[in-house]
Amino acid sequence: MRLTKLGHACVRLEKDGASLVIDPGVWSGPDALAGASAILITHEHVDHLDAPAVRAALAGDPGLQVWTNAAVAAQLADAAERVHVVGHGDTFTAAGFDIGVYGQQHALIHRDIPVVANSGFTVDGEVFHPGDSLTVPEDRITTLLLPANAPWLKVSEMIDYAREVAPRRAYAIHDGLLNANGLGLMRSLLKVAAAPTGAEYARLEPGTTVEI
C-alpha cells in the first residue's frame, strides 16, 4: 500500500489500482480528489471537508462513494445514495480497503465552541487517521497519522498521544497552520515523541509518497 501526504490533514492511500482519499479539505490541494475511488471524511470542519469539491467529484464520477458521519452526510445530501453514514465500531470495505471506525467526538477547542462529531478510520488494520481527536484505537496499528498542530492540541498532548498509541511509524498531519519556523520546531518535537521506542516519526512534504 502506498501513502501520499497531501495538504494539511489529507492523505491518499493506493493499492491494486484503487485510491482512497481521507479528509479532502480546503487546504488539501487542487488535485486531492483526482482519481479517487472512495472518500473518507472524519468531520465537518472545512480543513477536513471541502464540501463543494466533494460534491463536484461525486457529480463527475457516478461510481465514487463517501463514508462519514451524519453531520457531514447532511452536507452531501445531493448524492445521499452514495454517502454512507458510519459510527464508532463499524467496519466496512471501501474500494477494496478494509475500514474500521473509532471515536465519536472532536477534541475540545474551548467550552464555548460546540463539540462536533469526529470519526477516526483505520485502513487495512495498518493506518490510523484520527481526524481531530486523540482517539486511541482498540487494536494496535502500525502507522499513525499524527496531528501535529491545531487550536485544540498542546505539544504535551501530541507527544503523550503518540506514545500511548505506540505505532511502529508515525507521519505528521494537520500542519497547514505552520510556517517554516513552526515546521522546523515540529520536526524536533516528533523526535521527542519517538524517543522511548526509537520508532520512525517524520513529516512528509505534501506530494511525498511512501510504501507502508
Image (tube, rainbow, N blue to C red):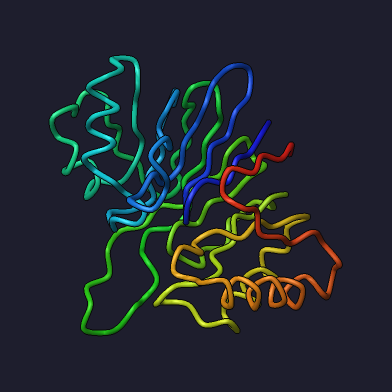
Quadrant showing the C terminus: top right
Residue 46 lies in what quarter of the image? bottom left
Q: Nearer the viewer, residue 122 or 56?
A: 56
Q: Residue furthest left?
A: 78
For the point 72% across and 49% down, which residue is it? 142
Residue 143 position within the rendered picture, expressed as x and y whole percent measured from the top left? 69, 50
Whether residue 160 is visible here, answered yes or no, is no
- Horizontal arrangement in the rendering, residue 25 relative to residue 79 (left or right): right
Residue 187 lies in what quarter of the image? bottom right
Residue 106 position within the rendered picture, expressed as x and y whole percent measured from the top left? 36, 65
Whether residue 85 is visible here, answered yes or no, is yes
Q: Establish if 181 lies above or below 63.
A: below
Residue 185 position within the rendered picture, expressed as x and y whole percent measured from the top left? 65, 78
Q: Residue furthest right?
A: 198
For the point 59% across and 16% down, which residue is it? 17
Residue 192 position within the rendered picture, expressed as x and y whole percent measured from the top left? 75, 78
Q: Nearer the viewer, residue 140 or 44?
A: 44
- Horizontal arrangement in the rendering, residue 109 relative to residue 184 (left or right): left
For the point 51% across and 64% down, which residue is it? 175
Quadrant showing the N terminus: top right
Q: Establish if 32 lies above or below 58.
A: below
- Horizontal arrangement in the rendering, residue 163 relative to residue 151 (left or right): right
**How many numbered markers are drawn?**
0
